[in-house]
Amino acid sequence: KSSNEEEKVEPSVMDAAAKTAKADVPDEAKGKVEPMVEPLKTPTDDDLQRLNESLSEAAKDCLLSEWTDWSGCKHDKSSGVKASRERRQRDLLQPQLEGGKPCNSTEQYRTCSDDGMIARVLH
C-alpha cells in the first residue's frame, strides 16, 4: 500500500461498533435530550417583594461614574503643590439619598515628573 491509501474497514465492523454504542443507552433515553440548564422558576410574591425592597434601598446609594484617564503631567502653580501632578476624576451620577451609602472621592491626584515616573497617589 502507498502512504496515501486509506485503510478500508469492512462495513460489518462499523455496524457492530454502532450497534454496541446504541446498546449502552437505555431505550427510554434514546432520542431524548436532557436540558443543560434548568429553566427559571416563576418568582413568588415574596421573591418580588424582596427584589423591590432591595432595588429601593440601592436607589438611595450614591452613584459615581467610572474614573477618567489620568491627565498629563503638569505643574499647577495655583494648587499650592510644588511638585508636578496628574489628575483624574469621576462624575456624580446620583447623590446619596437618606439612608443610602455615601459618595467616595470624585478626584484623585498623583505626583509625577517630566520623565514619566509616578511617585504616589494623593487623594
Image (spheres, rainbow, N blue to C red):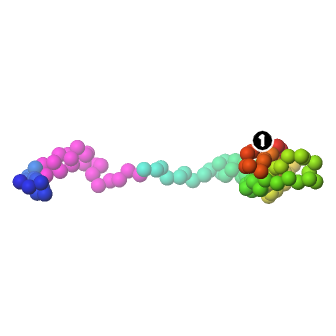
Q: Magenta stretch?
A: 14-35
Residue 92, quarter of picture: bottom right
**Location of mark 1 (residue):** 120
Q: Secondary structure at mark 1?
A: strand
The residue shown at (90%, 47%) is: 81
> Which of 15/25 is in front?
15
Question: Looking at this rendering, what residue extends furthest in the front direction?
Answer: 115
**Where does the image place residue 95, in percent across and percent down from the top left?**
84, 54
Asked if residue 32 lies in the magenta stretch, the reply is yes
**Where does the image place residue 44, in percent across and percent down from the top left?**
62, 50
The residue shown at (82%, 43%) is: 122
The residue shown at (75%, 45%) is: 118
User: Residue 89, can we see it?
Assistant: yes
The residue shown at (30%, 49%) is: 29
> Which of 95/98 is in front?
95
Q: How many marks?
A: 1
Q: Residues within 10 Å of mark 1 (few under 14, many from 20)?
A: few
Quadrant containing the N terminus in the rendered view? bottom left
Asked if residue 102 lies in the magenta stretch, the reply is no
Specify whether 103 is left or right of 26.
right
Q: Amino acid at mark 1?
A: Arg
Quadrant containing the C terminus in the rendered view? top right
**Where does the image place residue 2, in percent across and percent down from the top left?**
8, 55
> Which of 2/45 is in front?
2
